[in-house]
Image (spheres, helix red, strand yellow):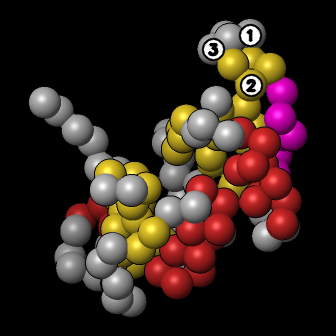
């Protein structure tokens, strides 16, 4: 088995944790000001790592272009519910729910508090 647990660098763990909890209904499972693991049920979905902590070379310095070359792509069971969650917290939505002819699925796109580009699809 191979499994990817994505870790993204963020400026403020609490702000990012709140965003992902409220939009995707994730639960924190680590806690702390420098690292957080967010789960759906027992599955780790995404990890948050504070910029400059723990001397990881790719996470030492925050830039104005977080996430260049990265798309956080989430598949969800209830796209409309997740979209309503994003609206409720006034997330920066780039494109409302629409049909993507490439994936043959509905999706919407938004940005997280650190500027990471997110696609949420059913």
| Front-most of residues 89 and 111 | 89
SS for callout 1 = loop
Q: Residue furthest left?
A: 1
Q: Residue at x 34, y 68 (%)?
A: 37
Residue 102 is left or right of residue 33, and the answer is right
Q: Residue at x 74, y 25 (%)?
A: 106
* Tag nearer the camera, 3 or 2: 2
The disc label shown at residue 101, or none: 1
- Image quarter hosting the C terminus: top right
Queried whether the magenta region covers residue 94, the answer comes back as: yes
SS for callout 3 = loop
Magenta residues (range): 92-98
Give the distance between the C-alpha atoms of the residues marked 2 and 1, in whole angstroms: 9 Å
Q: Name the spot of residue 20 as percent of width and height, x first.
A: 57, 64
Q: Name the spot of residue 59 as percent of width and height, x first.
A: 33, 67
The disc label shown at residue 103, or none: 3
Q: Answer yes or no: is residue 48 visible.
A: no
Reading the image, the residue beneath label 2 is: 106
Q: Name the spot of residue 87 as percent of width and height, x first.
A: 85, 59
- Image quarter hosting the N terminus: top left
Query: Is the residue under label 1 in contact with that under label 3 (CB below 8 Å)?
Result: yes
Majority secondary structure of magenta residues: strand
Residue 23, placed above or below residue 2: below
Queried whether the magenta region covers residue 28, the answer comes back as: no
Give the distance between the C-alpha atoms of the residues marked 3 and 2, in whole angstroms: 8 Å
Residue 118, placed above or below residue 66: above
Quarter-wise, where is residue 52 in the image? bottom left
SS for callout 2 = strand
Give the distance between the C-alpha atoms of the residues marked 3 and 1, in whole angstroms: 6 Å
Q: Residue at x 82, y 54 (%)?
A: 84
| Front-most of residues 73 and 8 | 73
* Count of labels in the image: 3
């Amino acid at each position: 088995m191979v499994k990817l647990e994505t870790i993204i660098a963020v400026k403020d763990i609490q702000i990012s944790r709140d965003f992902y909890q409220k939009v995707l209904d994730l639960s924190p499972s680590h806690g702390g000001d420098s690292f957080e693991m967010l789960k759906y049920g027992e599955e780790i979905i995404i990890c948050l790592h504070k910029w400059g902590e723990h001397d990881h070379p790719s996470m030492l310095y925050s830039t104005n272009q977080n996430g260049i070359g990265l798309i956080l792509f989430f598949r969800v069971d209830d796209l409309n519910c997740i979209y309503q969650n994003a609206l409720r917290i006034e997330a920066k939505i780039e494109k409302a729910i629409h049909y993507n002819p490439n994936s043959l699925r509905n999706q919407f796109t938004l940005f997280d508090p650190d500027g990471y580009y997110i696609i949420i699809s059913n």
